[in-house]
């Protein structure tokens, strides 16, 4: 009799554990499916609402950035301008427009000091692929859309929202920009003040295990990753920016590094110096009190009270 009862109990336990495993696998499968759907949804948004533009050549040091977009084109090419595109004689597929106005050629003065043959800046020059963003259509879907964040060669290619009073600050933790409930949420700025007008503007996003949203932001812990991803793009309806990254670090959620407002230049300079000192990466330049910076913030694995942050200075995109 005891053996029979033992077998019954054993069978019940086995069925229970099988059920638990089945439910767990189903839950994991649904989460994976949901994650893939999130990636596809935002990929579709990027394809519909953005388009690739021209290539910019910009210097490593943002302080060398010129307002003239021609300043960083290699000087040893004979470029012709055709409808804001470049005709390059080294490209056999290019067609020269006979009506195009050539770029001015320098006259040779026998008494003039020879000009250097190197590029007009003494620092390495990056190729930066620009985007055009259709904010008109984005804001028809959701008037909270205030920007688009894009990091080439990464998953970061998303609209950014500013939480309105209608939805509240926590709404976008669990909703996409088009109001669909989703664990990935949205990238969003602090609802205080005008986005990107203050000295330190935060963009928050979830660290998704599938790499979406800010799931790959912690790659900036590595100097080798920073060396290949020094510039992030920030597009807004009124101005496009290059965000030159200068620091990346882990902090407590209520730490000094989360400061947004500063009493004066000295307080802001102290904050910047602290970020540079604390950073896991080393930039080749330092920010100044004249800069407006953006802080990208995401959660940390197995530490609910910590955040990983990446900071960069904004420069208007030429």
Image (cartoon, rainbow, N blue to C red):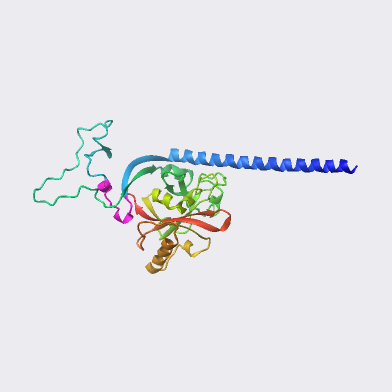
Describe residue 73's horizontal placement relative to residue 190 as left or right: left
Residue 232 visible in the current orientation: no
Q: Identify the residue at image location x=26%, y=49%.
A: 68
Q: Identify the residue at image location x=43%, y=42%.
A: 137
Q: In the rendering, at what x and y percent does residue 148 appear?
A: 43, 47
Which picture quadrant has residue 303? bottom right
Residue 85 visible in the current orientation: yes
Q: Which residue is most to the left?
A: 110
Q: In the rendering, at what x and y percent does residue 98 appear?
A: 20, 32
Describe residue 2's horizontal placement relative to residue 234 as left or right: right
- Viewer-proximal residue among 114 and 289: 114
Q: Is residue 97 above or below residue 256?
A: above
Q: In the rendering, at what x and y percent does residue 102 appear?
A: 19, 39
Membership of 69 in magenta stretch:
yes
Number of numbered discs? 0
Magenta highlight range: 59-72
Q: Identify the residue at image location x=54%, y=39%.
A: 36
**Image quarter (top left, top right, bottom left or bottom right) of the N terminus:** top right
Q: Is residue 27 above or below residue 251?
A: above
Q: In the rendering, at what x and y percent does residue 139 appear?
A: 45, 45
Membership of 288 in magenta stretch:
no
- Viewer-proximal residue among 302 and 232: 302
């Amino acid at each position: 009799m005891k053996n029979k009862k033992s077998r019954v109990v054993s069978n019940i336990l086995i069925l229970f554990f099988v059920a638990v495993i089945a439910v767990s696998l189903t839950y994991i499968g649904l989460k994976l499916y949901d994650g893939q759907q999130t990636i596809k949804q935002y990929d579709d948004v990027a394809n519909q609402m953005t388009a690739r533009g021209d290539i910019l050549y910009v210097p490593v040091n943002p302080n060398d950035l010129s307002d003239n977009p021609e300043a960083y084109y290699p000087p040893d090419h004979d470029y012709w301008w055709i409808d804001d595109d470049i005709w390059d004689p080294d490209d056999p597929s290019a067609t020269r427009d006979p009506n195009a106005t050539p770029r001015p050629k320098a006259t040779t003065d026998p008494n003039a000091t020879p000009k250097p043959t190197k590029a007009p800046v003494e620092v390495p020059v990056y190729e930066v692929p620009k985007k055009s963003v259709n904010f008109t259509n984005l804001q028809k879907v959701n008037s909270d859309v205030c920007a688009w964040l894009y990091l080439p060669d990464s998953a970061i290619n998303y609209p950014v929202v500013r939480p309105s009073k209608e939805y509240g600050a926590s709404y976008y933790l669990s909703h996409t920009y088009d109001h669909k409930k989703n664990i990935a949420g949205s990238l969003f700025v602090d609802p205080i003040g005008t986005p990107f007008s203050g000295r330190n503007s935060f963009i928050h996003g979830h660290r998704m295990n599938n790499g979406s949203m800010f799931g790959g932001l912690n790659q900036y812990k590595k100097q080798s990753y920073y060396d290949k991803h020094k510039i992030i793009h920030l597009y807004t309806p009124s101005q496009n920016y290059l965000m030159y990254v200068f620091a990346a670090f882990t902090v407590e959620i209520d730490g000094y590094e989360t400061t947004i407002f500063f009493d004066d230049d000295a307080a802001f300079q102290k904050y910047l110096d602290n970020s540079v000192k604390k950073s896991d990466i080393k930039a080749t330049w330092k920010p100044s009190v004249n800069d407006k910076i953006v802080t990208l913030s995401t959660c940390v694995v197995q530490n609910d009270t910590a955040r990983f942050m990446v900071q960069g200075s904004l420069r208007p995109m030429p």
